[in-house]
Image (cartoon, rainbow, N blue to C red):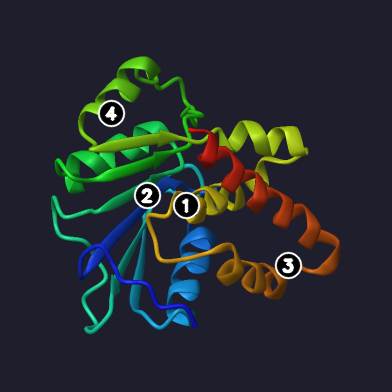
Amino acid sequence: MRKEKLKKDPYNVIISGVGGQGNVLLSGFIGTALLNEGFIVSVADTFGVSQRGGSVSSHIKISEKNLYSSVTLKGKADVIIGMEPVETLRTLLDFGNPAVITIVNPRPFYPSGGVEYPDLSEVRQTIEKMSSKTQYVQATEEALRMGNPIYTNIILLGAVVGSGILPLSRESMIPLLEERFPDKLLDFNINAFNKGMALIAET
């Protein structure tokens, strides 16, 4: 078991996206891997009015010594993993602070019903202004190149692990992927994970 120190204790991570992007699976992988590394972890998933297409956020609180309430206090996020730009910005407005780090999949999820999407360049500029560090990972674009957008969350998982913002490694994640996915899907998901690690290294 590898036990690196946290940057602070507790360490607050929020994954922000919309229903159908695999937000909950991503939080489950991260939470389980951290538990396996010996940390005390609490996870809470919150859903908007509509599960598919509505706002979804997962709060992960990590500690070396105490069990805390999983929901992050306003303005106290340390890391925001954004699966969608506008949802990332919404989360920043509630939980951001000058020290927060953001990792963002910049592909928009356009709302149905003719609702206008904000100007994407302005959204990105605001995310960058509100973060101490922002890294963009073209997770959806790469998943589409692989043939299925379902791999977006696993690509982001690789990016998060590769970024070094959490005390996790490739070695801590691969057994979880092997446990979760059947043989016919395992290679695709390991390739997606590896792609995410490569993408974050390029940013």
Q: Residue at x 37, y 49 (%)?
A: 49
Q: Which residue is mark 2?
A: 49
Q: Which residue is mark 3?
A: 181
Q: Earlier in the sequence, mark 1 or mark 2?
A: 2
Do the residues bearing badges 1 and 2 touch, measured as CB atoms within 8 Å? no
Do the residues bearing badges 4 and 3 touch, measured as CB atoms within 8 Å? no
Amino acid beneath label 3:
Phe
Q: Is residue 55 visible?
A: no
Q: How many numbered marks are there?
A: 4
Q: Which residue is mark 4?
A: 128
Q: Can you give x and y, in whole percent of width and height, for residue 95 in the image?
A: 19, 48
- Secondary structure beneath label 3: loop
- Secondary structure beneath label 1: helix
Q: Is residue 178 above or below residue 132?
A: below
Q: Please name whichever residue, 90 or 172, is drawn nearer the observer in this view of the structure.
A: 172
Q: Please name whichever residue, 171 or 102, is drawn nearer the observer in this view of the structure.
A: 171
Q: Residue at x 59, y 67 (%)?
A: 173
Please indicate whether residue 172 sits to the left or right of residue 164 in the image. Answer: right
Amino acid beneath label 2:
Val
